[in-house]
Image (cartoon, rainbow, N blue to C red):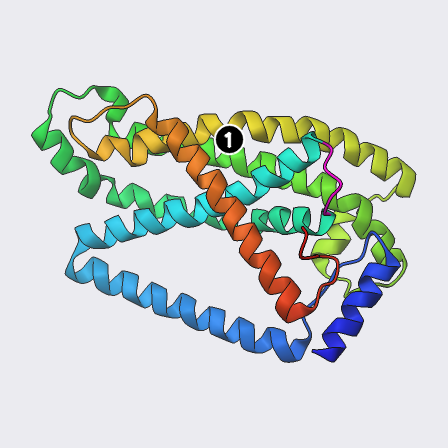
Amino acid sequence: MAHAARRAERVVAQGPGVGYALPRAVSRPVAGVLWGLLALGGGAAVAGLLTEAARAWQIYLVNFLFWSGLAQGGVVFAAIYHVVGGKWSPAIRRLGEGMAAFLPVSLVLFLPLYFGLEAFFGPVRAINPLRGGWFDPRFIFVRGFLGLGSMTVLSLLFVYYSLRPEVGPALERGLGRPLWLYRWLAQEWHGPEVERERGKRGMGVLAAGVLLAYPITYTFMAFDLVMALDPFWYSSLFGGYFFISTFYLGLAGTAVVAVLARRFLALSAITPDQ
């Protein structure tokens, strides 16, 4: 812990463009636990599909909506932080941006839902056969994938323009390990001033895009993947309730990560007031 504290103090003192990496002695056990949980979850999913498929798809959908909403809510928080010109904690903004790493995974995890749509909507059609083509499972899947894909692209580009002006100087100063991602972010580097101005313009446009696309995409997700599972219930307010709930979920997730980062990594850039 003392080593982590000294490392964190050095990171803060050196200013922007510096990242914090877990020591290998910590990161390897953490990675092992995460891989173990992933294997356990995958095994449980396969066992559920083989024994009680309908119930397994329900659990999959609930987990998909929860974790996807949490990750997107974190990015939306970062976009709001930029739009309002927040200055109170760039470190916490970075935690929200970091949740964008799950969005490509979330997009891939959406694909298996295609095979579970009949389990969801088959009983609904049997009870209420008057539903129109809007609730055709294939149409639901296509518009859901397009919406999530658009949100993922906008969010990743927003984070790209946020990180690029800081990754370049960090690599020039030899701070941190030169991972392929850092090298890709700093390709065709044009100098700190040019990149900061370019990043500011890009973030301004993309933050607005994220904030405009987010309520539309998650409103449709609420209608298509939650409300449509009831044969007769309709509510025009449910979409707003859903996307605001996922935003709150992202705020809660960011707060939990901030507390854990400060407590266990001794990151003094995150203060109790923040």
Q: Residue furthest left?
A: 127
Residue 180: x percent and y percent? 71, 58
270 left or right, relative to 251 = right
Which corner quadrant of the image does residue 158 belong to? top right
Q: Quadrant of the N terminus?
A: bottom right
In the picture provided, is 91 more to the left or to the right than 235? right
Q: Is residue 261 magenta?
A: no
Helix, strand or loop at mark 1: helix
Q: Which residues are magenta?
A: 85-89
Q: Is residue 87 above or below residue 24?
A: above
Name which residue type carries label 1: Tyr
**Residue 207 x %, y %:** 65, 31
Residue at 83% from the left image edge and 51% from the top image edge? 16
Whole-percent x, y for residue 112 in the image: 34, 47
Q: Is residue 21 left or right of residue 251?
A: right
Is residue 143 visible to us here? Answer: no
Task: Provide the major secondary structure of the magenta segment.
Answer: loop
Instruction: Identify residue for label 1.
Output: 214
Image coords of residue 101 (percent x, y): 57, 51
